Image (cartoon, helix red, strand yellow):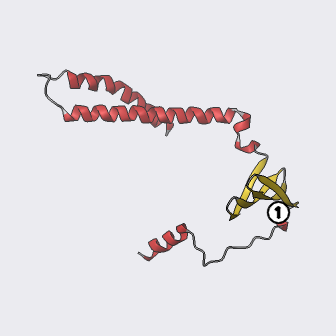
Amino acid sequence: MIRQSVLLLLLGIGLFPALAKGAEGQAGGGDFSFLSSFLQMIAALLLVVGLILLTYYLATRLMRKIPALKVGSQHIRILEVRALGPRKALVLIEVAGEYLLLASSGDNLNLIKQVPMLEEIEVIDESPDRLSFFSLLKRATSRS
C-alpha cells in the first residue's frame, strides 16, 4: 500500500510540470483544453494524497519509537463508563491488575469499591427491548 502511494506520488510529481507546460504551450494560447486541465488536477490530487499518506506513515513510525506513546505501556485503562445523570457517572477502571469502581460527579471523583479480580464482577446483559442503532440497521437490511 505504501509502495503504491509512493509510486503514485513520484508519478504525480513527474507529470505535474509537463501537464502545466502542456496547458500553457498550446497553439494559439487562448484555447482551453479540458483534458490537460483534468490531468493536471488529478496529478495535484495524487500529490496531496501521497503527501498525506507519507506523513501518516512517518508519524506512525515515530509513535512506535516513543515509549510513552506505545499502546502496551498503558498502566491505567478505562473499561466502562455509565452515565447516571447530568455530570454524574460510574467509571470502572483497571490499574495494575486491580479493578476500581469510581463515582464521578461534577468535579469530584470518589472510590466506591475495589474489586481484586474480574471474575467477581457479575456481567448482566442489557434488556433486549433497548436496541442499538446498529441492530436496527442490521434487522432492516436483512429483511430486504
- Residue at mark 1: 118
Q: Quadrant of residue 17?
A: top left
Residue 16: x %, y % from top left? 33, 26
Q: Secondary structure at mark 1?
A: helix
Q: Examine the rendered structure and indicate whether residue 46 appears above or below residue 127.
A: above
Q: Residue 41: percent from the left, percent from the top?
A: 31, 34
Spot occupied by residue 95 in the image (x, y as percentages of width and height): 82, 51
Identity of the residue furthest to the bottom in this view: 129
Q: Is residue 29 left or right of residue 36?
A: left
Q: Nearer the viewer, residue 5 or 51?
A: 51
Q: In which quadrant of the rendered image does the C terminus lie?
A: bottom left
Residue 8 visible, this orientation: no
The amino acid on which the numbered mark 1 sits, given as a three-letter code, is Leu
Whether residue 77 is visible to the viewer of this picture, yes or no, is: yes
Q: Which image quadrant for residue 59?
A: top right
Where residue 93 appears, x then y in whole percent? 78, 55
Taking the image as shown, residue 77 lies to the left or right of residue 51, namely: right
